[in-house]
Amino acid sequence: MKPGVIRRLYDWVMRLAASEQALPALALVAFIESSVFPIPPDILLIPMVLAARRNAWKYAAVATVASVAGGYLGYAIGYYGFNALGRPIIDFYGLGDRYAALKASFDQWGAWIILVKGMTPIPYKLITITSGALAFDPVMFGLASVASRAARFFLVAALLYFFGEPVRVFIERRLTLATSLFAACLVGGFVVIRYL
């Protein structure tokens, strides 16, 4: 995707964040980002929480529910129309190499992949479409998606709620680092619980 197109989409989403339609826009962006849209809902969530911190948890919940619902659309694209729609979407975003690597490790680590990668800036659409294409258990897909997307959006909302503007700057500059550290802590916690 060309940088100019991404910039125009980004500017459009930022205008939505400042409008009265911000909450429905957040739900829409979270829904379609899970299957086809290139802009993550964080860019709406961040300014919305900073503008009305008392609503941080509501915004994170809306982003989570809409993202998981959109994830099932991505799952359906992979399951029912991978060759017609899923593969072209993955190729459009230049994710073909990532798809091949993800597919190779899905048999052994399926739920963990959804759980961990759903919290990171790795395009969630890659996870949802791959899950459908591989006919991953839809209930397990949903549970892992809820856990990962809630962890991501509630972490962003909590950091902004408690620490405000400095956290926004950090998140925007180092989103990969912030979510990767959180994912590592979460997985580490599960490993400790399982083996102790």
Image: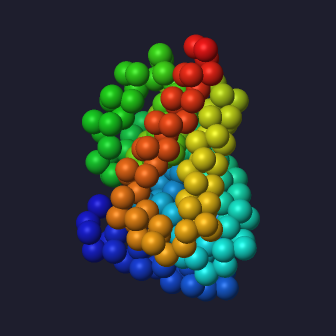
| Quadrant of the image occupied by residue 172 | bottom left
List x then y, in percent, for residue 6: 34, 69
Q: What sort of colour scheme is used for the picture?
A: rainbow
Q: Quadrant of the C terminus?
A: top right
Residue 66 as seen in the image, left or right of residue 74? right
Asked if residue 104 is positioned above or below residue 127 in the image, the reply reads above
Q: Residue at x 48, y 54 (%)?
A: 36
Residue 194 against residue 79 in the figure, above or below: above
Residue in the image at 52% along x and 31% along y: 187
Choose between 115 and 165: the one closer to the eye: 165
Q: Is residue 95 above or below residue 157?
A: above
Q: Quadrant of residue 190?
A: top right
Residue drawn at x 58%, y 54% as measured from the top left? 155
The answer to whether residue 37 of the structure is visible from this angle is yes
Residue at 56% of width from left, 22% of height from top?
Answer: 192
Asked whether the viewer can see residue 114, the reply is: no
159 with respect to 125 (left or right): right
For the view shown, which residue lies furthest in the top direction? 195
In this picture, residue 132 sits left or right of residue 121: right
With respect to residue 12, does 187 lie above or below? Answer: above
x and y, in percent, of residue 38 in the image? 42, 60
